[in-house]
Amino acid sequence: MKNENITYQLVFDDSKVQTFVKHLWDIVMNHNCLEMKNEKEITGKIYRPELAAFLCSESFPVETDNEKQVTIIDGRKYQETYIKGFSEGKEFFKNNYIEPPGVRYDDRYISNLYVRYNGTGHNEHEGWNFVKSGYPITISNCIIKEWGYYAGIVSEYEELKRNYPVSFEKFEIEFSEETDSKAPKTYITKYTPQQLNTIR
């Protein structure tokens, strides 16, 4: 892709964008994600309708860092970058957290994964699941790949959880008891390329 290092600010106050996000909201909420495939049939999952709107739109309004003028770009051109990051995130999780067949996942192991998913996995404050509770307003190839990467980790984590529901159940109960009284957390995550280099 040309201009790989250009950083854009996504513009969400456009009425067409808002309508598209609302449409995608139902899909993402009902299916936990939106799946997209590239020409090689490799799938990437997107966990937020705002990010899905950008990646699925052929004309999305943005501002560049240098000029505060709104211009239109094709968000679909970033799909391959997102899917590449997604595949790398899945591979990272499989290589580092999936045990060979027959090996039992003990409480300590599940607890470690659970903490990484919900808290301290992405940085000291957020877990891997930040891709489900926020979206980037600053985008570039690097940022889109990073969001795909963590979405791939989340996808594999959720698959492991589906395969071993009893092992995760205890931690689900403990976590829900701790967070029941808190208001839902909604936020917009904004990263610079320099900050992204320190995430992993």
Image (cartoon, helix red, strand yellow):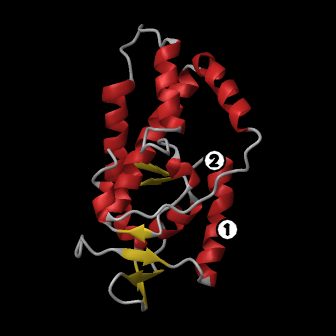
Amino acid under disc 2: His
Say whether disc 2 or disc 1 marks the residue closer to the N-terminus.
1
Q: Is residue 153 above or below residue 38?
A: above
Identify the residue at the far front of this view. Answer: 124
State the residue at coordinates (33%, 74%): 7
Which quadrant of the view contains residue 140?
A: bottom left
Return the x and y of residue 45 as percentages of the image width and height: 48, 49
Depth check, mark 2 against mark 1: the one in front is 1
State the residue at coordinates (45%, 47%): 151
Measured Cα–Cα span from mark 2 to mark 1: 15 Å
Q: Provide the residue designation for mark 2.
A: 31
State the residue at coordinates (73%, 50%): 183
Instruction: For residue 41, say whether it is visible.
Output: no
Q: Nearer the viewer, residue 147 or 23?
A: 147
Q: Report the disc number at residue 43.
A: none
- Quarter of the image with the N terminus is bottom left
Identify the residue at the far right of this view. Answer: 181
Return the x and y of residue 200 as percentages of the image width and height: 32, 44
Q: Report the disc number at residue 22.
A: 1
Return the x and y of residue 9 as percentages of the image width and height: 43, 76
Identify the residue at the far bottom of this view. Answer: 69
Q: Secondary structure at mark 2?
A: helix
Q: Secondary structure at mark 1?
A: helix
At label 2, counting other C-alpha atoms closer than 10 Å, the crowd grade (few under 14, some 14-19, many 20 or more) is few
